[in-house]
Amino acid sequence: MDPQQLKGVQSERLAKLAEYVYSNSPFYQQRFDQHKIKPDSIKTIEQITDLPFTTKIDLRDNYPFGMFSVPQKGITEIHVSSGTTGNPTVVGYTKEDIKLWSDVMARALCCAGAEPDDTIQIAYGYGLFTGGLGFHYGSLEMGLTTIPASSGQTKRQLKIMQDFKPRILACTPSYALYMAEQAKELGIDPRKSSWKIGIFGAEPWSDSMRDEIENLWDMLATDVYGLSEIIGPGVAQECPHKDGLHIFSDVFFPEIIDPATDQPVEPGQDGELVITTLTKQGIPLIRYRTRDIVSMNIEKCRCGRTSPRISKIKGRTDDMIIIRGINLFPSQIEEVLLSIEGTQPHYQIVVDRKEHGLDMVQVQVEIEEQLFSDEVRKLNELKAKIQNGIEGVVGLRVDVKLVEPKTIVRSEGKSKRVIDKRKN
Amino acid sequence: MRLKQISVFLENKKGRLQDVCSLLGSNGINMRALTIAETESFGVLRMVVDKSDQAIDLLRKNDFAANVTDVVAVEVEDKPGGLAGILKIISDNDVNIEYMYGFVEKFSDKALLVFRFEDTDHAQRILNENGVSIVAEKDIQGL
């Protein structure tokens, strides 16, 4: 789309959005009033910087449906992702939102290089997590042959690949590496697989990991970006030039700001990605702080698309760790430890990616006197309690290791909470 | 009479057992009985020492997770079936053993075994009623 024409569309949509949330969302009505913003004064996309930010904390505080702009009966689908403390993040889609999701995901598939007569194997989890169903809707919309394999059961994934010959694979990048390893063990040559295009996301990954995946599978490995608060997967997608992710800015308006000053940064500079959902109905968000650090390129891409491109995620403004599409916060671990013995022992989260394998999390907990028992059975019970507690809150099975007191390195009296060894 | 057993949490890493032993040794504390319960990632060292109060202070000061548990040390005839006799008394009276282990040395012609019972009071009563000889704290110190 011509940039001027795009601006016109964005402006028109923002003006409509301001009116829409003001009249349908008590939360935004209050926010606008607080900031003395008259919705009918918003006429151009440049005015977006006059609007207040929305944060994850707003979503949490308004759990479950306080941020919705339509009553529950107007919501056709609900997804949930793990939250920082206590409440998870809930998002609701109207019928039109599902259509929007289908459209942007179809655009993402197309951007990655999918053709209408392709078959896609979707090995993202289906369920409350947005990964599986997001791809599913996009695939149906684009008219691909859809295999809803969901995640796990690697042997069966490989058999599906061999027997149905899908050209496209969608899963987390670490799972793609893991499957290559499994394939080799089963005597399958990954380079002879039918998968020629991979669409990988839901966790951070680097260009060296991309090289590894492309070499192992002899495929094109592309990055997809999304977050459930905005829509799920389908916010931005790499084209075969792999030079940034095309963000669908006609519906998800991006800004890059300096998280310290909240002011916009120059194109190409690193900053926090802030997104406004221009057309969403169920839970439209204005200037949502993603906490993802990226840079933005506004030059026209070699593929011909003029949409701005965001870089791969370079970091986070908070201490969130993303593991296999699941968000993990140290505060969740603290909460679990506190609930178990009423004390908060020193702990450390170690994230590692096995060579050609999945991301693994180990939580090391220092055994202090009140936690220690001379009976191995009780120590094992404690370990299981911590493990189950974390699984209950985060939805992730982690390895728990009990360690001796004072063995976790402390810096300035405070122990370093997270060690992320995922280099590739 | 019951004895104070000291337990120490040990990670499975090189030299940790030696660290405990040399700490106690260099402070003139003598180990009389010990055993290690292990799992794949950690172990629990259990021991009876001659100066238990001093030992527990020392360990805690040196950042070991350590605690004290009541155990009963019993004299057992050092002959075939000696232990079986005691165990029969124990099981006939529905006393549960959590774990047990032997002393390093003998100080009479009898063998010495350390028992950790689920219910120490009950176990002691049963053992007394059946004339089983129980080792007292002072006996350990005098070894």
Image (cartoon, helix red, strand yellow):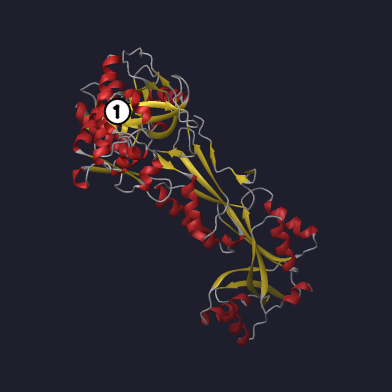
In the image shown, does A397 or A392 lie closer to the viewer? A392
In the image shown, does A97 or A82 lie closer to the viewer? A97
Report whether B94 appears left or right of A217.
right
Chain hosting mark 1: A
> Would you place residue B7 above or below residue A293 in this image?
below
In the image shown, does B14 or B83 lie closer to the viewer? B14
> Would you place residue B82 above or below residue A26 in this image?
below
In the image shown, does A49 or A200 lie closer to the viewer? A49
The residue drawn where x is 40% and y is 43% is: A57
The residue drawn where x is 24% and y is 40% is: A24
The residue drawn where x is 73% and y is 60% is: B58
> Is residue A292 visible to the viewer in this orientation of the structure?
yes
Tag 1's secondary structure?
Answer: loop
Q: Quadrant of residue B136?
A: bottom right
Q: Quadrant of residue A154?
A: top left
Q: Position of residue B139 (x, y in %)?
A: 75, 76
Q: Position of residue A371 (x, y in %)?
A: 57, 60
Report whether A239 appears left or right of B8.
left
Q: Amino acid at mark 1?
A: Ile
Q: Quadrant of the C terminus of chain B?
A: bottom right
* Pointer 1 local density, CA inside 10 Å: few below 14, some 14–19, many at least 20: many
> Would you place residue B48 above or below residue A88 in this image?
below
Q: Position of residue B5 (x, y in %)?
A: 66, 68
Q: Quadrant of the N terminus of chain B?
A: bottom right
> Would you place residue B8 above or below residue A298 in this image?
below
Q: Position of residue A330 (x, y in %)?
A: 49, 45
Location of mark 1 (residue): A42
> Is residue B109 visible to the viewer in this orientation of the structure?
no
Report whether A352 appears left or right of B113.
left
